[in-house]
Image (spheres, helix red, strand yellow):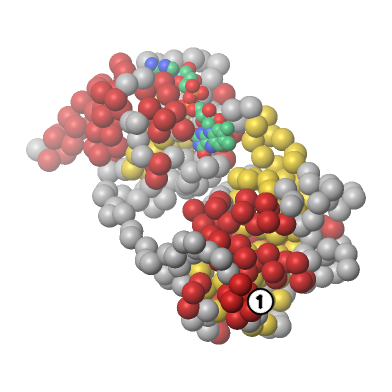
Amino acid sequence: MTHQGIWVVAEQTVSGISRVSFELLAKARELKEQGGLQAPVTAVLLGENLDDYYSAKLMEAGAEAIILVDHPVLRYFQNETYAAVLKSLVEERQPSIILMGATAAGSDLAPTLGAKLHTGVSAHCVDMRLNEEGHLVAVVPAFGGKVLGDILCTNFRPQIATVRPGILGKVICFMHKQCPVERFDIADILAQDQSRVKALGITYEEMKGVPLEEAEIVVAGGFGIESKEIWQQLETLAAVLGGAVGCTRPPLDEGWAKESQMIGTSGKSIRPKVYIGMGISGATHHICGMKDAGLVISINKDEKSPIFDVSDIRITADAATILPLLIEGLQKNEDDVIC
Ligand SMILES: Cc1cc2nc3c(=O)[nH]c(=O)nc-3n(C[C@H](O)[C@H](O)[C@H](O)COP(=O)(O)OP(=O)(O)OC[C@H]3O[C@@H](n4cnc5c(N)ncnc54)[C@H](O)[C@@H]3O)c2cc1C
């Protein structure tokens, strides 16, 4: 049997199915059409209490076949068990391409599955297409985000790729579509499962302020902020504007910001009305996460900085000098309005 067909490994969440699963189904349908493929786009969902709601949602989002693996042991993501189930399914059905969200679970599962199946994984893709030979071309930023590289897995199958939520963006909606739904029994797999880890529950971090993904104004800082003290001024500016703070990777490495604040291919994708970027160079890894912002205002001391190429308002200035002026000006304005 030759490998064929595109699978999307969907993800169950507390409120249903993760949006990235739908984004991947839309991309899978596009790839199928582009390659003139015959095999149905298949959604595979592992979880607990997978009733008709789940299959209806997957059909609506473009699945042409659905495999549900429903078992109490799959209630919480647990890498070894999930990988054992998927390995067994993949070896039996032999899909050619497997797409997963680069979520916390997907980023763990994809390489484990790749290693178990002795195949390659393209992580954190920003786009994908099929080439003339029918291979998946996974587009991944490289060299600090300065270039986009095409990654191919020509000698092994399946070809596995992960994409961060929001990077593909587009979701399709087919109303009243029907497709075959199969329930896959895992009793035999569980009997042999050697998993050493058991997930007992999920604890959610308490959110403070406006969530980054929902904020209408985002003030993002990069390595050009230069110190924790100036970073605090950036946080003050965001608070004065009623916005959220975002960051590139270096502020995370420096300990100024938290991982949940990173914007980009390994972070979050945002669509605020206004994005203010300070001390950010404009690497592809970051741009991919903010390209859909409404008004982009950038402040950088280098007038040739690439971030200016994607900005509506370009300000050549030192962030440390401009931050206190902006805060003071905005606060003064607020006082004037109150008076
Ligand atoms: C696999 C992988 C995944 C990655 N994922 C992400 C991701 O999701 N998100 C992300 O952001 N990055 C990511 N990165 C890192 C990314 O490639 C870049 O290195 C990063 O975005 C650069 O951050 P920066 O612009 O803050 O820093 P730099 O590139 O160092 O730029 C700093 C900028 O600040 C300016 N500047 C300096 N001093 C001042 C000042 N006083 N005032 C004003 N401007 C000043 C400089 O002119 C420069 O343009 C990833 C990298 C890899 C390898």
- The percent position of residue 160, horizontal first and vertical second, equals 70, 53
Question: Which quarter shows the N terminus?
Answer: bottom right
Q: Quadrant of residue 44?
A: bottom right
Q: Quadrant of residue 279?
A: top left
- The percent position of residue 58, horizontal first and vertical second, equals 61, 73
- The percent position of residue 260, horizontal first and vertical second, equals 39, 45
Q: Secondary structure at mark 1?
A: strand
Disc 1 packing (10 Å; few <14; some 14–19; many ≥20) = some
Which residue is drawn at the image coordinates 28% and 34% (left, top)? 235
Mark 1 is on which residue type? Ile
Q: Is residue 18 above or below residue 277?
A: below
Q: Is residue 84 left or right of residue 158?
A: left
Which residue is drawn at the image coordinates 43% and 70% (left, top)? 15
Question: Which quarter shows the C terminus?
Answer: top left
- Which is more toward the observer, 124 or 126? 124
- Which is more toward the observer, 26 or 84? 84
The answer to whether one can see residue 130 in this image is no
Q: Is residue 29 left or right of residue 71?
A: right
Please give the residue where the numbered disc 1 appears in the rendered image. 67
Q: Quadrant of residue 20?
A: bottom right
